[in-house]
Image: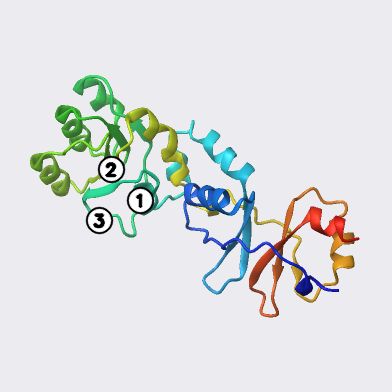
Amino acid sequence: MTLRDIALRRPPNISAAQSLRRAWQTMLAENTTTLCVTDDAGALEGLITLTDVSTANLDGLDNYALAKAETPYDNVVDTLDGALLAGESAGKTVEGRIVIGAGSAEQMEHAIHRGDIVIVSNRSEGQLTAIEAEAGCLVVCTGVEVSRIILRVAEERRCLVVSTPHNVYATGQIIAQAAPVRRYMYRGDILSFRLDTPVAEAARAVSGVRHRYFPVLDEAGRCVGMVSHRNLMQMQ
């Protein structure tokens, strides 16, 4: 009996550019802790696990986390359940820090650097200060309306403006999950199998491995599913 003859787990594969938040949502929907990361042709590029997502959440303490991960702004908009009100996000990546735009205008001027993502509330003064300080992106929380003047100035300064329904605290907590999967996925020596691999052979191969799921590839090298450590051990 080969792996072709048994029921494989078949959660959807994800791309390396996809956000960690989307990966986590897929894990929840599919009741799995591991996803295969593949290229456009379906070839295996890596694995992303729930542990990796947790590590990324801890990286949220690093204000440069999104910049280091070369995070697309499209990921930021999607992760924050946001709407882009000004600017063009396609093809653009985060270049600065994540900054909470609190305090007086003078304090904000000193705190904000060029290219930063600045999370603000409904204070027009704070919004304008962030834009004039050359922020790369202004994230306006709780879905408040942004004035036409602010949007016009943002367009002139090439500052993206994103509206999110979340409050400032929640936005600051989840924005790090916009980082692309490629930053945290495992790319090392991945133990994988072919559809024609005998079940007994696969079971022996995983007996000393602590991972829970292993990719299964078809004849063309495309990832078609995963087999679990538990199932292989039970079939011995």
- For image coordinates 34% across by 31% down, the residue present is 99
Q: Position of residue 202 (x, y in %)?
A: 84, 64
- For image coordinates 47% across by 43% down, the residue present is 177
Tell me if label 3 and label 1 are in contact, CB under 8 Å.
no
Q: Amino acid at mark 1?
A: Tyr
Q: Give above or below for 35 relative to 103.
A: below
Q: Which residue is mark 3?
A: 88
Q: Amino acid at mark 2?
A: Cys
Of labels 3 and 1, earlier in sequence is 1
Q: Amino acid at mark 3?
A: Glu
Does 30 sit left or right of 217 as displayed? left
Residue at the bottom extreme of this rendering:
219
Q: Position of residue 40 (x, y in %)?
A: 51, 71
Of labels 3 and 2, earlier in sequence is 3
Q: Give above or below for 47 relative to 176.
A: below
Whole-angstrom CA distance, mark 3 to mark 1, is 9 Å
Q: Which residue is mark 1?
A: 73
Of labels 2 and 1, earlier in sequence is 1
Residue 145 has which mark? Answer: none
Does 80 sit left or right of 195 as displayed? left
Q: Position of residue 102 (x, y in %)?
A: 28, 23
Q: Quadrant of the N terminus?
A: bottom right
Q: Position of residue 33 (x, y in %)?
A: 64, 49
Q: Which residue is mark 2?
A: 137
Q: Give above or below for 56 relative to 35.
A: above
- For image coordinates 45% across by 40% down, the residue present is 176
Crowding near the residue tagged with mark 2, few <14, some 14–19, many ≥20 C-alpha atoms within 10 Å: many
